[in-house]
Image (cartoon, rainbow, N blue to C red):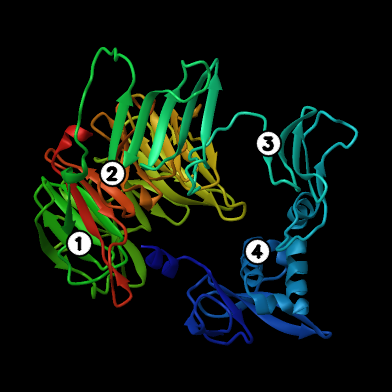
Amino acid sequence: MKKIVQSATPKYLGVTETVPTTRTVVITKGERLGAQDANAGDWVLMAKTVGGWKVGVCYRWTGSQWINLEPEYNYTEQYQAALYHICEIEELMKETGHFGALFAKVLVAQQALIDELLVNQAFIKNLVVQKLHIDSDTNNPNDFETKINKTDGVLVRNKNRTILHIDPQTGQSAFNGDIKANKIFLNKANQDEGVIEAVNNGWKLVIQPSLEGIELCIMGGDGGTMKKKQLYTYISGGLMSLAVMGSISCSNLFSSQTTFNSWEKVDIPTTQYYNGMTNIFTHQGRLVLMTNTNEIFTSSLEGVLWKKQNDLLTDERRLSLLSAISVGENIFTIGSENNKIFLFKSKDFGVTWDNTNIEAHEVFSDSEDVFILRYDALYKISANFLNEEKIYESHGTEEIINMVLNKEVWIVQTHDRLLHYFRLYFSTDKGKTWHNRARNGYACTIAFGEGFIFMGNIEGLKKSPDKGVTWVTISNEEVRSLFYIDKYLIILSNDENKGGIFVSDNNGDSFSFISCGYSYGFLSMVATPTARIITTDVVGMSGGSRKAVLLVNKNKQYF
């Protein structure tokens, strides 16, 4: 889909030495080198010599001719894109005349922004110093300060007390404060090293490597010598053992098996190898799976046996099957025809596709209504595909990247191309008014729960009880995908080494880890009345290409 949008959306092509008289321009530095055909609105950067200086001038193809983009302050976005691109090219960075002239142009167009950068930010590739002292007020002993040097080692102080000190002579470290961490690793091989201890009133809790594997024990009650283990747990050979010295008192005692054997690995029956990207959903009582090689498969709701429905790899309409969605009796996606991008629909599980003649760059749905993205605006499409209603339009340097919605809340996620952050805009009145309810450093995934909205990305997971007005962090797990199935909130971790999923049945107040038995990158998940299915990222290689599988669980009692 991205390739389709890029072919129709004005874009920066790269650096050229000469602007031609036709649409075909020779790119010397850019994403694609050599002769490239420009679409209307595309622009390039040409270097010309004036008075011994190399001056960068942007030119835009109007559809019939190339025009220079001057004065520069009227074309901020175009020159900013050229500057970002040239900063990433090492050999052009060395040509100070070229780079300096282009940077001067951006100074004209973005003087206020550059002033802010010069005052408050520094861009440094390598920093080598003998002494480093960070202190906003050297006369105030109560403020935060950090010293790194040969004498002090590493010294961090706040409120006139030492928080962290690493002695440069002995290597010993001391920390005074609370530790909040997602993970703590102990990698010492010796039994007496890598110990975590908690001591209180003659009792000690210890977590440490042992001869058996790893042990956790609570010790005490023998005069303080700490040799009598009151509770002893060790893990070895994949088994956990627990020994208790004394009586056991509990209200309930349960035993349970793991879920390793509950998940079945299912190969996708494709003749093509692909990069693991798939799109899976239910439609008309069947499962539909689409790959980035434009192959379409269908299955019963168990998801174990699959039938190839169609192969659109050579279809000139370039249908974006990874963006396909199910709405009523139709499957919708985006494709191109006559050099334009349209909304297509299929009533026979992707065997045939009809052009609705509605221009669109992306498609969304709340399971009943169809919404499309076209350039910088979102539209709601009527049931007869004859009318459309604009419900949202982006502004400034923001671009729309996603829309999620249910019957009560519509959410639009945008990306600021200049400042590189992401925003969530909420509407509770069917798009009449919109409110900025969240700002993130990374794109996020959204899930609707019972009375809550959940938002996750690589920074963790948050939930809101009031439709985005307030948010509270409920997990530090890096979220790749997020789902709310039945009453369960499910996290697919960004860490493919986890080999499982995180499940909560209390709206994120606590999570249980469910092992799937395979350490793949988990992309997406779908639930049916008879199974849970996870799509994976990369499993195996063939000739430099990758293949993926599905993980199918028909034992739903575990989540």
Q: Mark 1 Cα within 10 Å, few/some/many (few <14, many 20+)?
A: few
Q: Secondary structure at mark 1?
A: strand
Residue that label 2 marks:
238
Residue that label 3 marks:
174
**Camera-side residue of 191 and 126:** 191
Instruction: Say what amino acid the circle numbered 4 marks.
Output: Gln
Disc with the residue nearer the chain's start (1 vs 2): 2
With respect to residue 72, does 56 lie above or below?
A: below
- Residue 192: percent from left, percent from top: 51, 41
Residue that label 4 marks:
80
Q: Secondary structure at mark 3?
A: strand
- Contact, mark 1 vs mark 3 (Cβ under 8 Å): no
Q: Secondary structure at mark 2?
A: loop
- Residue 74: percent from left, percent from top: 69, 62
Residue that label 1 marks:
354
- Residue 395: percent from left, percent from top: 56, 48
Disc with the residue nearer the chain's start (2 vs 3): 3
- Contact, mark 1 vs mark 4 (Cβ under 8 Å): no
- Residue located at (23% from left, 19% from top): 253
Cα–Cα gap, marks 1 and 2: 55 Å
- Residue located at (38% from left, 67% from top): 4
Instruction: Say what amino acid the circle numbered 2 marks.
Output: Gly
Disc with the residue nearer the chain's start (4 vs 3): 4
